[in-house]
Image (cartoon, grey):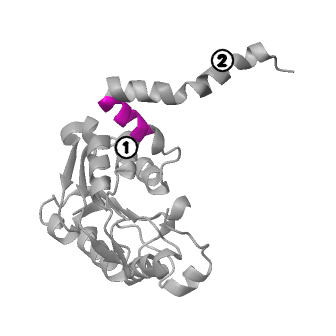
Amino acid sequence: MTSKIARAPDNIARKTLSVRHRLIRTLAPQFYKEAVLAISTVNLMPRAAILYIKEVMNGKKLCGAEIGVAAGVHAEDIMTMLNMKKLYLIDPYEPYVEVGRLHTDYLADKQKAALRLKRFGDKVECIYQSSDRAATLIPNDLDFVYIDGNHTYEYVKNDIETYYPKITDNGVLSGHDFGRAYNGDVVRAVVEFVSKHNLKLEIGSGADWFLQKGLFNDARALEPFSILQGLPRIERA
């Protein structure tokens, strides 16, 4: 049986929690803001594409790009997990329509991303442009690209076709939300591309997809909707 004396420290901690929060927020507002941000968005498991890139690149210093940054949680994982020389982060942070839904909550994400990623200095370059425009501003020797922007079919298709040529041989093209979410638009765009070019597509946990440039598939054609039938419904967080 736990004694009242043993429980006393826990009781005191709970009762003084709000007071301690107010005190720190008043005396060290910037520290408090950064601490709350870090705790509220901690990501215990990096996405499968990061682990794949880490494995195939084998410690090489990397230059990569992410399309669709949002609050910068995944970008932080990339910078933490991979040996990055340069990461281009592409997000216009403006209202957009995605599979019939209007998104307007972008300014808070922009601020969170800037705060989260500032510790990486000039290894990170934010490009506040559309992915089409950004493609003209970054080099053509990327080791990887991660696509997580507008998930509407036409946008995913365009991002894949635009950025695949910008990846070096044996580089990795990857992305998120390969599943039933977004009406299966991501699945359709990805599978059409890999079928057309006979590329080997791999699917990882957390709805990640990835392929290595120059790694071809043994089977010729993949059917997007037959693949979709076998996938669980994965909703956007």
Quarter of the image for residue 81 reads top left
Q: Position of residue 135 (x, y in %)?
A: 17, 66
Q: Residue furthest right?
A: 1
Determine which residue is flagged by label 1. Answer: 82
| Residue 180 belongs to magenta span | no
- Mark 2 highlights which residue? 9
Q: Which mark is residue 207?
A: none
Single out the mark in the foreground, 2 or 1.
2
Residue sitting at the far left: 137
Q: Residues at badges 2 and 1 in contact (C-beta under 8 Å)?
A: no
Q: Residue at x 24, y 73 (%)?
A: 162
Q: Secondary structure at mark 2?
A: helix
> Where residue 65 sits: x, y (%)?
27, 56
* Residue for point 25% across, 61% down: 91
**Magenta part of the protein: which range?**
29-38
Judge from the rendering whether residue 15 lies leftward or rightward of residue 28; answer left or right: right
In front of the other: 113 or 147: 113
Which of 165/38 is in front? 38
* Secondary structure state at the residue bearing disc 1: loop
